[in-house]
Image (spheres, rainbow, N blue to C red):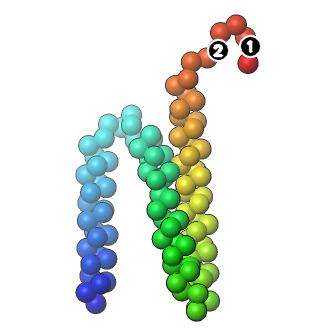
Amino acid sequence: MVEMMLLVFTFVLAIFLGLELISKVPSMLHTPLTSGSNAISGITVVGALVAAGTLHDSRFGTILGFVAIVFAMINVVGGYVVTNRMLAMFKSKEKGGQS
């Protein structure tokens, strides 16, 4: 019960910190911040791997861990793709028509 209360407290604290952080960042920087945080969410992959590995005795835990890994990887890859596209917008175009 204490562990559950600690997890709920951490979740609520993360919500308030996230709202405070997003409200202080200028709207122009929301997309880079979001893409960066998506790329950092590789931590989710580690958590999903641990969940899938430790719950191997139950079929539901394994399936849930696999689904978590798939969604976390989609989030991580999407974050890298969006970051790459944003960084490409800041590169200078080559002169002379050569590519």
Q: Nearer the viewer, residue 11 or 51?
A: 51
- Position of residue 49 in the picture relative to residue 1 (left or right): right
Three-letter amino acid code at the position of disc 2: Glu
Q: Is residue 17 above or below residue 10?
A: above
Task: Work out which residue is located at the far right of the displayed protein and give it.
Answer: 98
> Which residue lies at the image location 61% right of the left edge and 66% below the top edge?
70
> Which residue lies at the image location 39% right of the left edge and 37% below the top edge?
29
Residue 97: name its quadrant.
Answer: top right
How many numbered discs?
2
> Which residue lies at the image location 56% right of the left edge and 79% below the top edge?
52
Q: Quadrant of the C terminus?
A: top right
Q: Position of residue 68 (x, y in %)?
A: 56, 71
Q: CA distance from mark 1 to mark 2?
A: 7 Å
Q: Position of residue 63 (x, y in %)?
A: 62, 81
Q: Determine whether label 1 and label 2 are within 8 Å by CB.
A: yes
For mark 1, what is the residue? 98
Q: Is residue 99 above or below residue 17?
A: above
What SS does tag 1 mark? Answer: loop
Q: Position of residue 92 (x, y in %)?
A: 56, 18
Q: Is residue 3 above or below residue 45?
A: below
For mark 2, what is the residue? 94
